[in-house]
Image (tube, rainbow, N blue to C red):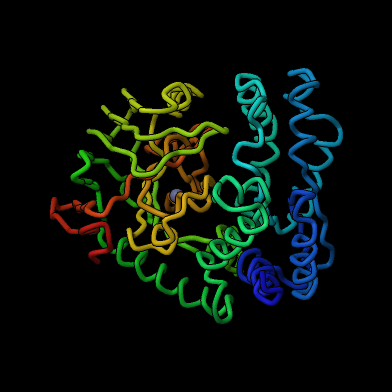
């Protein structure tokens, strides 16, 4: 891939993604496989004025060995090094940059039960530390082609060609293939914010989804909870950062307990290394009460049983059918990309900060008022070429939001 394009992409991640400011520390998580690219991102962070950039190296083979040999208790708890890291993150609030390059099947062969129990236990152990820094640091997730990932996305190509093809796809959907990506994102950001403002002005109470694939579904919204899109701010901060590159969605968190009907998936869902295909989810009183999948039934059911909130909805996201990711026709086997391809729902945790006055109310109060809580959050795509979404406002008025898969507002 053209060196200049890759350098521009690294600059986009530092400048627009993490929005690194003079004097800030930066923490990058990256696989050893993409060390050169991580170094490029670090260079741009320093050029933005970062006071220190630390890279936390990851390696899938090492991770796998851990799951194979280390016992579950050791893996599930935080040791001194883990706690030191948590304390460091809370004390310094570095900008977090997560570079994703993993093989979607990288953990295949690992005991699935052990894996999900360990992940759940670690999430719980980290939760009190995380709570101290939540919404107080800038962060950005962006993808970088790893060899195995590229082979998975382009199985018919030779490894080198597959990596090149994945670079092209990633740069295109990140708006980093032509022109100045930082400038491209300013325009894109303005478009997203315009849609968000229109949605929020409508005061919607309900969304009704219909598609010829059988989707016939409605979901209640929480009064006052807003739609969010694109760049975000830290609590009380003035620096806008882009948490996801790419990002195409306007999303909100629905009212727990108010979802009825059935939705049909329009893209496979890659979950903990298993591909779940051609599935439907039926809701009653807000809860997913029946799931049917042609492939991956067991994995799909397991999502509902992680905890009390994992069978309720935490997100409704609107993404036009004409989004660049959907246009690419590529299944990336990675949520960052695939969730930005089409309208989706997520089972599990809602986004507490979307609640007005969240800073004063806090998590518990927001949960009481209808925001779902869970340790999990799993997105799945339901956007189709003929999906219609009708909004119902507080006076019962019907407003077309999506017609034939695309924005109607
Ligand atoms: Zn989403």
Q: Is residue 135 above or below residue 184?
A: above
Residue 180, x across and y down, in percent = 58, 80
Q: Which residue is drawn at the image coordinates 79% and 49% (left, top)? A: 32
Residue 280, x across and y down, in percent = 31, 32
- Quarter of the figure with residue 163: bottom right
Quadrant of the snapshot with the C terminus: bottom left
Quadrant of the snapshot with the N terminus: bottom right
Residue 282, x across and y down, in percent = 28, 29
Q: 142 or 194, which lies in front?
A: 142
Q: Is residue 136 left or right of residue 31?
A: left
Q: 344 or 361, which lies in front?
A: 344
- Regarding residue 375, the answer to whether it shows in the image is no
Q: Which residue is drawn at the image coordinates 45% and 35% (left, top)? A: 348
Residue 56, x across and y down, in percent = 80, 49
Q: Which residue is drawn at the image coordinates 38% and 56% (left, top)? A: 227
Q: Is residue 23 above or below residue 149?
A: below
Q: Which residue is drawn at the image coordinates 65% and 35% (left, top)? A: 127
- Regarding residue 192, the answer to whether it shows in the image is yes
Q: Is residue 177 left or right of residue 86?
A: left
Q: How many marks?
A: 0
């Amino acid at each position: 891939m053209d060196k200049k394009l890759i350098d521009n992409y690294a600059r986009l991640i530092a400048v627009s993604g993490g929005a690194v400011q003079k004097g800030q520390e930066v923490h990058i998580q990256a696989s050893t496989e993409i060390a050169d690219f991580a170094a490029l991102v670090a260079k741009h962070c320093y050029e933005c004025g970062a006071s220190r950039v630390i890279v936390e190296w990851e390696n899938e083979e090492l991770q796998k060995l851990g799951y194979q040999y280390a016992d579950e208790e050791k893996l599930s708890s935080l040791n001194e090094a883990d706690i030191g890291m948590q304390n460091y993150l809370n004390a310094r609030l570095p900008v977090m940059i997560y570079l994703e390059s993993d093989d979607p099947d990288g953990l295949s062969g690992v005991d699935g039960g052990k894996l999900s129990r360990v992940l759940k236990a670690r999430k719980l152990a980290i939760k009190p530390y995380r709570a101290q820094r939540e919404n107080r640091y800038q962060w950005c997730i962006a993808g970088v082609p790893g060899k195995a990932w590229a082979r998975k996305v382009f199985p018919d190509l030779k490894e080198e060609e597959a990596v090149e093809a994945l670079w092209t796809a990633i740069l295109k959907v990140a708006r980093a293939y032509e022109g100045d990506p930082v400038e491209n994102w300013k325009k894109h950001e303005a478009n997203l914010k315009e849609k968000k403002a229109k949605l929020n002005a409508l005061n919607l109470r309900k969304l009704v989804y219909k598609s010829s694939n059988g989707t016939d579904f409605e979901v209640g919204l929480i009064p006052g909870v807003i739609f969010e899109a694109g760049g975000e701010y830290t609590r009380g901060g003035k620096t806008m950062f882009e948490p996801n590159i790419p990002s195409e969605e306007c999303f909100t968190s629905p009212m727990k307990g108010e979802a009825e009907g059935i939705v049909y998936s329009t893209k496979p869902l890659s979950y903990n290394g298993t591909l779940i295909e051609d599935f439907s989810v039926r809701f009653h009183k807000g809860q997913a009460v029946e799931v049917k999948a042609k492939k991956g039934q067991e994995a799909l059911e397991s999502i509902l049983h992680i905890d009390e909130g994992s069978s309720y909805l935490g997100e409704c996201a609107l993404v036009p059918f004409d989004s660049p990711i959907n246009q690419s026709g590529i299944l990336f086997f990675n949520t960052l990309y695939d969730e930005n391809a089409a309208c989706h729902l997520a089972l599990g945790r809602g986004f507490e900060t979307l609640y007005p006055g969240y800073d004063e109310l806090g998590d518990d109060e927001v949960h009481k008022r209808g925001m779902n809580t869970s340790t999990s959050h799993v997105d799945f795509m339901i956007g189709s070429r003929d999906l219609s979404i009708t909004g119902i406002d507080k006076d019962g008025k019907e407003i077309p939001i999506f017609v034939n898969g695309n924005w109607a507002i």
